[in-house]
Amino acid sequence: MPKHSELSCCHFRSERCFGSCILVTEVLDGVMDITTNIVDILLKFFDKLAKTKLLILDDFGLSHHDKQQQLDLMDIVEDRHGRSSVIIANQLPITDCYNIFGDRGITDAILYRLVHTSYRIELDGYTL
């Protein structure tokens, strides 16, 4: 025999909504499944990113990054520091990084790991 609360939910669902109602527990189960899938996808992505020998960030700095994006980039750069390569291609001088990120601490941390151990190639002239 079902518990009183289970009986009430079943009765409400079948009698009041004519079967078209979704119980909150079913919705939460679905959300948890989706959340688990997203977390799995992100973990696989970051695992694949960590194994990549060369990361190329093209047109870097064309848009501003929110706080979470800044922290994510800092984590990626920190994980790769001294182990694998990063190429950043952009049309901005290094000093503009402070305008892109906004947070001076995060910008300093990223630049320290990139600039001080890098080869810089600055091109001057006509662009397409």
Image (cartoon, rainbow, N blue to C red):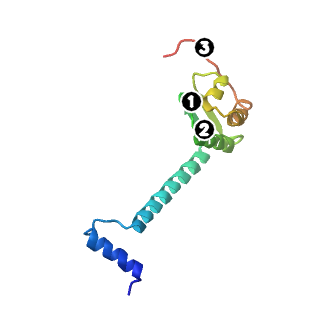
Dot label at residue 60: 1
| Above-or-below relation of 112 to 19 | above
- Give percent across and percent down for residue 8: 36, 77
- Residue flagged by tag 2: what amino acid is it? Leu
Distance from the alpha carbon under mark 1 to that under mark 3: 18 Å
| Quadrant that contains the N terminus | bottom left
State the residue position of label 3.
Answer: 124
Viewer-nearest residue: 127 or 74: 74
- Give percent across and percent down for residue 93: 64, 21
Label 1 sits on a secondary structure element that is loop
Q: Would you say the residues marked 3 and 2 are in contact, meaning their CB atoms lie under 8 Å apart? A: no
Q: Would you say the residues marked 1 and 3 are in contact, meaning their CB atoms lie under 8 Å apart? A: no
Label 3 or label 2, whichever lies nearer to me, is 3
- Residue flagged by tag 1: what amino acid is it? Phe
Q: Earlier in the sequence, mark 1 or mark 3?
A: 1
Label 2 or label 1, whichever lies nearer to me, is 1
State the residue position of label 2.
Answer: 54
Viewer-nearest residue: 18 or 67: 18
Q: 10 Å neighbourhood of mark 2: few (<14), some, or many (≥20)?
A: few
Distance from the alpha carbon under mark 3 to that under mark 2: 25 Å
Res 53 quadrant in image: top right
Distance from the alpha carbon under mark 2 to that under mark 1: 15 Å
Viewer-nearest residue: 109 or 115: 109
Left/right of residue 119 with respect to residue 62 in the rendered view: right
Res 23 quadrant in image: bottom left
- Give percent across and percent down for residue 128: 48, 16
Label 1 or label 3, whichever lies nearer to me, is 1
